[in-house]
Image (spheres, rainbow, N blue to C red):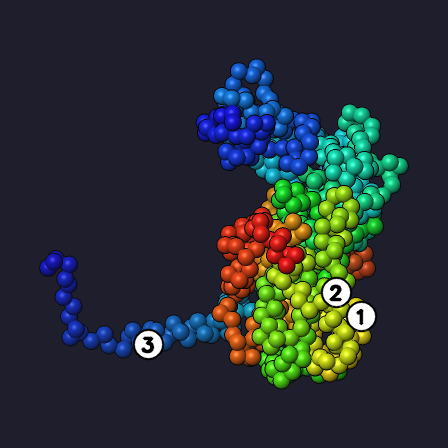
Amino acid sequence: MPKCTIDGKEIEVAPGTSVIQAAEQAGVRVPRFCYHDDLPVDGNCRMCLVEIEKFPKLQIACGTPVNEGMVVKTQVTSEKAKEAQKNTLEFLLVNHPIDCPVCDQAGECYLQDQYMDNGLHDSRTVLEDKIAKRKVVDIGPILLDAERCVVCSRCIRYEREVTKTNLLEFVNRGGSTQISTYDGGPITHEYAGNLVDVCPVGALLSKDFRFKMRVWFLKETDSICPGCSTGCNMTIDHRDGEAYRFRPRRNVDVNKSWMCDPGRDLYKTVGPDRVTTAHKAGGAVAPLSDLLDEVAAKVQSAGAATAFLASPHASNEDAFAFKKLALSVGGRLDFRVGNPQDKVTVRKDQILQREDRHPNTQGLLNLGLGVTGVDALLADCKAGKVQVLVLQDAGLLEDAGVAAAAKQVPYVVAIATHQGPHLEAAHAVIPAAMWAETDGTFTNFEQRVQRFKRAFEAPGDARPRWEIALELLTRLGKPMNAATAGDVFVEMAVETKALGDLTHRSLGPMGRVAGSNTQAQATA
Amino acid sequence: MASSVITVNRDTRPGYYPILYGMWLTLKNMFETLFVKGRSATIEYPEKKRNISGRYRGVHLLTAREDGTPKCVACYMCATVCPAECIYIESGERPEKKIEKYPTRFEIDLLRCVFCGFCVDACPEEAILMSRENDLVGTSRAELIIDRENLMHRGKLAEVGPGYRPDDHDVRRPVHIAALERLKSEHGIVPGMPNRGH
């Protein structure tokens, strides 16, 4: 473990750590354009120059590994390094257009940040002398503006190393260098959104997010992508209860800094077409508490002639409360519609996506929600043995098998998030919050329990699924001692060996892999 | 202590003189304001109006490019700086690639506005200015949320003239205000430059 001194602070780092990473650990952010934590080092932008003792010239912090006894002075303590960074920035800005008012990157732009830190000079280039390049070039889901580019090659390295598609390359030379796809063709893979995040300036911008919102208005909430069993860490950017975009949040063990485009598109599902009021068959609106009373009475009177169908879209807390509800009346319980458990670990591509398009199949397996068997449960429904069928997600009704079985059940309760024709089959529709509107945890394909946080309020009467289950339990005379999702998690951790001593707080921002006995639990 | 105390003789009587003097002063002022020209402190509003400062911060206006489209590029600086959060902007794609962005919606809720002029200061394009229009009347709340078209063609602008714009070298640069230009081309009227001070 080599020791080094950065700005007078002595730290010990892992062998092979570069100076830029060591400085980060010492709490100093060296400015950079081309360096990216999850991409190979290129060292072309020359922005991260620092002074290292016994080196005759300034060195790039990203390309210099830390050696034993190295004494580094960054821009914080070294005038020489600060001056060099300032000059580098001025060179980078020579041909940069004055586009900030119309550029979507404004507010999260490395050039803007570093101009405010280091630059603050007037441009020595007259506007007319700047080299004009291509602007607003449509390359599929992305718009390319070659004038704004600082030729850092982050996007090129991303294409080469992460997606292995090599769609972008430099063309021309000198001041006219610009990035381009072959023959101006479109980006075709499903990971194009990452190019926008990777680009430190406004050269590659998302067509979808274009002009929607200035980024400084957006609030960030840590969340987990519900798109598949990989469970990519992400940030919800939202304003006034509306999600504007999803961005990947770095987690080296799960998704690094990446996220797929289908996952990013899920922000569109949060807002529109939501169920906001409780209603009965035919759309007659009822107060939520009245409807819950009615559902509880039906469940109580049906007793063991009930069936509970959970959904792998639900969080661990939702699933645990739902299980409690089913057990309290001794009803049938399962969730494996379409056998998602067979696909949990199966990759869809070689990057991030997995075949199981549910976020929490593994969590439900761990909790032991597969009790009756889906086929047996649905067969009982069809045979008329079931008086009340409770669906944790109304989306289950879109499955032909479930819809056919529900027709034979006299009273179908659907906990629903979105409007749709499938809700007509339900006799009671309870509005539910989506994952972005409540706290909770998902367990991903590798048993990592990851926490997502509430970004904004659910619309209308919609309540989290765990809360609906708790309300019903209270009405059935078997209340659970929990007021928040965190409380439910504690109750769950007590009963589920797999979760051990975890709590919402101890999961931290990166989640934790549940105990080693989970595999036995899952197969049991 | 004793030196600061004065003794007042309360037994003296002032007589009628001060009362009569006071009455005379009051009546003199009353008749002077009624009959002597230029002596009145009030004006016959709304027939007559005060000469407002050229830097007056009245209702906003949006300036235009030479082709009549808004100069605004929808950068949201005004909406960001606005302490009353009364500016609502939606942006869209402008057909020509040179500018790219423009506001498809631009609304100011004048009932929330505090007329601080920060939006004018923040604007990098001199797209939003203030006029000297200050008599704002509406019969409903919705009427006082003015939209982009209304901001570009303020009806009373010709009468009151433009108001506050940032006091820097840019002031001498020509601005295109649609309402003023229409007035000039259709009626040949050029309202005078704002009169600074009373």
How far apart in space, not on screen, are marks 2 and 3 (Cα)?
A: 103 Å
Chain hosting mark 3: B
Residue highlighted by disc 2: A337
In the rendered view, tell whether residue A37 sits above or below residue A259.
above
- Which residue is outermost to the left? B2
How far apart in space, not on screen, are marks 3 and 1 (Cα)?
A: 105 Å
- Quadrant of the snapshot with the C terminus of chain A: bottom right
Secondary structure at badge 3 equals helix
Locate residue A167, reporting x and y percent. 82, 37
Given residues A118 and A9, the one toward you in this image is A9
Q: Are marks 2 and 1 in contact (CB under 8 Å)?
A: yes
Locate residue A35, reporting x and y percent. 65, 32
Residue highlighted by disc 3: B20
How far apart in space, not on screen, are marks 2 and 1 (Cα)?
A: 9 Å
**Number of numbered discs on residues:** 3
* Residue at screen point 83% across, 28% down: A172
Q: Quadrant location of residue A270?
A: bottom right
Residue highlighted by disc 1: A401
Given residues A44 and A372, the one toward you in this image is A372
Q: Please, what is the three-letter code of the amino acid marked with disc 3?
A: Leu
Chain hosting mark 2: A
Please identify, in this view, whether the residue under mark 2 or under mark 3 is nearer the observer.
2
Locate residue A181, reporting x and y percent. 84, 37
Q: Quadrant location of residue A87?
A: top right
Q: Please, what is the three-letter code of the amino acid marked with disc 2?
A: Val
Secondary structure at badge 2 equals loop
Q: Please, what is the three-letter code of the amino acid marked with disc 1?
A: Gly
Q: Is residue A147 left or right of residue A466?
A: right
Which numbered disc flags the more N-terminal residue, 2 or 1? 2
Q: Quadrant location of residue A395?
A: bottom right
